Image: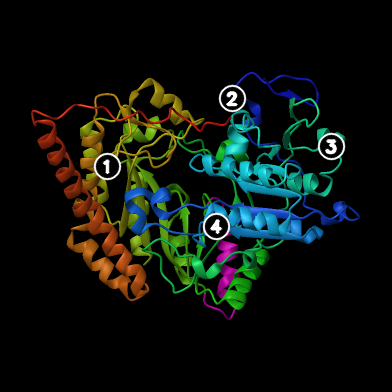
């Protein structure tokens, strides 16, 4: 059934205008006073059960386990209004679905919500199914990127009542506060819902993005099991916290889904708010290191300068890293960031070939990337380069160019990933035109889409060849004297357990897993060659997407 908006306009496609961010309007703030006097509801926020192997595949040993900041912001908003809240991360707590059902029975929530991503939708829908089995009157709500980008797919589940799109602090608060007034749901901006009487899927108008991010309270990290989380293996500090100081990105890269949630807007917290949050995390939890998880921390140079200057004026020492683009830094800025406590920057390099950079609309040159890495090294800041191998139209020679670029420049760390297009992005559309899909099996799995039984491969390439190139990239980069020396120097700043995971991940990915794959293939060929063997094909896995019904 096509969506019908509250104005009666029908939507035509899966990724229509509703999957893009709302417009930014002046004066939009989160105001808890708007909800004073509402009937208090019991709200349960859930991170569904999972495992590191499910989330990171063969790089599980190098993976990070972090609290969901988006959910933490939602929790803080709901708590500010006064609703009783129960938040649990069953993934971090390593608890089962039986624990989820037990907690629903004990807490008796009026509303259950979770964040949907392309790689966890099966678990989100299982959560809602359990909730409805326990109590059909529980209102189930989906947020997160999947709700914004593919609302029609999500609403196919009979166990999902409604979803909130884009930025949800205001829309979710409004839905929870007046959830018993079904007829009022049609007035809630940023909400898509199934009418409980008619079954009609109704899409309300957008909830404009907030202009003043400082109006939202600090994320409610106290509701998370903070002792259970840990960062990626190369991150410094004994206790590391993640936080965001801005939302959005103004660029238009083909592979990114951020613009489908926030549009190409850019908003940020004030310098005072950022410092207060850093101090709060240090004093409340004893964090000694921070990751700024902004899409592009240095997007506005003047703002970074002000923030660093404020950091330097305090009587505290902050240790932090950030993520950004190479064309948004310069040597002077990097030196200031270093003095303010920045020890590492992660750059989205993507490719070492100009044709590929142009194709993914990176709006950068190979020279831009090279220059920024030189500056960063000169400023005394460690740097990480992240690369995508196997882009649409990419040739083996271009893949080699990317690997050579990583090895010949002054990168301290490098992350090489085989391209897995994100549905709904421009890269996905390119991939459909310039590649093909193969069936996933025990050796070849789709990390981004674990419920998708197929893996995308660019035309003219084979998955096995891409995986071999990926292993070659890691070997070529990390088996160099510079990389080994850098690891030894950084070793003093990383806890022993994290260093062990770093070594374990490398040995597993580069040596053990390929050896196991080879042995499995040899055994399979041996037994299939025996005269009494029968060539039986494995049952095919499910087709693309999650079975929603």
Question: How many C-alpha atoms fall within 10 Å of the one at disc 3: few (<14), some, or many (≥20)?
Answer: few
Query: Dividing the image into 4 quarters, which one contains the N terminus?
Result: top right
Mark 2 or 1, nearer chain start = 2
Determine the residue located farthest toward the right in the rendered image: 37
Mark 2 or 3, nearer chain start = 2
- Quote the CA–CA distance across marks 2 and 4: 31 Å
Q: Which label belongs to residue 402? A: 1
Residue 352: % across, % down: 29, 41
Mark 4, residue position: 90
Mark 2, residue position: 14
Inspect the magenta stretch and tell me whether residue 308 lies in it: yes
Secondary element at image label 1: helix
Q: To which quarter of the image does residue 260 belong? A: top right
Q: Nearer the viewer, mark 2 or mark 3?
A: 3
Mark 3 or 4, nearer chain start = 4
Mark 1 or 4, nearer chain start = 4
Per the rendered image, the range of residues in magenta is 299-317
487 vs 75, nearest the viewer: 75
Question: How many C-alpha atoms fall within 10 Å of the one at disc 4: few (<14), some, or many (≥20)?
Answer: some
254 up-or-down from 173: above or below? above
Q: Which label belongs to residue 182? A: 3
Q: To which quarter of the image does residue 357 belong? A: top left
249 vs 363, nearest the viewer: 249
Residue 346: % across, % down: 41, 55
Question: How many C-alpha atoms fall within 10 Å of the one at disc 2: few (<14), some, or many (≥20)?
Answer: some
């Amino acid at each position: 059934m096509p969506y019908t908006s509250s104005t009666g306009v029908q939507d035509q496609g899966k990724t229509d205008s509703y999957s893009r961010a709302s417009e930014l309007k002046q004066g939009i703030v989160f105001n808890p006073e708007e909800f004073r006097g509402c009937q208090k509801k019991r709200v349960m926020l859930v991170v569904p059960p999972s495992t590191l192997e499910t989330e990171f595949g063969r790089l599980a040993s190098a993976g990070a386990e972090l609290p969901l900041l988006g959910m933490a912001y939602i929790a803080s908003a709901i708590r500010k209004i006064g609703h009783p809240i129960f938040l649990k991360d069953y993934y971090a707590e390593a608890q089962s679905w039986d624990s989820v059902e037990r907690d629903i029975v004990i807490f008796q929530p009026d509303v259950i919500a979770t964040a949907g991503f392309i790689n966890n939708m099966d678990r989100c829908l299982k959560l809602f199914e359990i909730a409805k089995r326990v109590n059909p009157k529980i209102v189930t709500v989906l947020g997160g990127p999947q709700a914004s980008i593919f609302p029609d797919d999500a609403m196919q589940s009979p166990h999902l009542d409604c979803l909130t799109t884009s930025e949800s602090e205001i829309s979710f608060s409004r839905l929870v506060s007046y959830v018993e007034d079904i007829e009022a749901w049609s007035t809630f901006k940023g909400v898509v819902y199934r009418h409980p009487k008619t079954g009609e899927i109704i899409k309300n108008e957008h909830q404009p993005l907030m202009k003043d991010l400082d109006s939202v309270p600090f994320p409610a990290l106290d509701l998370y099991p903070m002792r259970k989380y840990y960062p990626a293996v190369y991150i410094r500090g004994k206790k590391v916290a993640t936080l965001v100081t801005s939302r959005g990105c103004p660029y238009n890269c083909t592979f990114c889904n951020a613009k489908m949630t926030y549009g190409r807007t850019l908003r940020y917290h004030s310098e005072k708010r950022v410092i207060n949050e850093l101090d709060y995390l240090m004093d409340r939890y004893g964090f000694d290191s921070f990751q700024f998880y902004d899409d592009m921390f240095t997007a506005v140079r003047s703002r970074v300068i002000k923030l660093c200057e404020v950091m330097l004026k305090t009587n505290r020492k902050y240790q932090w890293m950030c993520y950004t683009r190479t064309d948004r830094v310069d040597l002077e800025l990097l030196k200031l960031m270093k003095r303010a406590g920045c020890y590492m920057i992660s750059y989205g390099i993507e490719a070492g070939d100009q044709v590929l950079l142009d194709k993914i609309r990176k709006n950068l040159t190979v020279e831009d990337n090279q220059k920024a890495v030189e500056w960063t090294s000169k400023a005394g800041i460690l740097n990480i380069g992240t690369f995508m191998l196997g882009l649409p139209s990419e040739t083996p020679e271009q893949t080699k160019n990317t690997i050579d670029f990583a090895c010949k420049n002054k990168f301290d760390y490098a992350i090489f990933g085989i391209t897995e297009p994100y549905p709904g992005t421009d890269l996905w559309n390119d991939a459909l035109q310039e590649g093909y899909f193969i069936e996933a099996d025990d050796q070849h799995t789709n990390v981004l889409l674990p419920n998708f039984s197929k893996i995308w491969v660019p035309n003219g390439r084979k998955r096995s060849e891409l995986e071999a190139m990926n292993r070659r990239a890691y070997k070529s980069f990390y088996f160099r004297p510079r990389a080994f020396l850098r690891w030894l120097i950084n070793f003093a700043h990383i806890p022993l357990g994290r260093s062990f995971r770093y070594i374990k991940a490398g040995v597993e990915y580069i040596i053990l897993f390929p050896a196991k794959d080879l042995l499995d293939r040899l055994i399979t060929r041996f037994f299939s060659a025996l005269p009494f063997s029968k060539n039986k094909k494995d049952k095919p896995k499910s087709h693309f997407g999650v079975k929603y019904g």
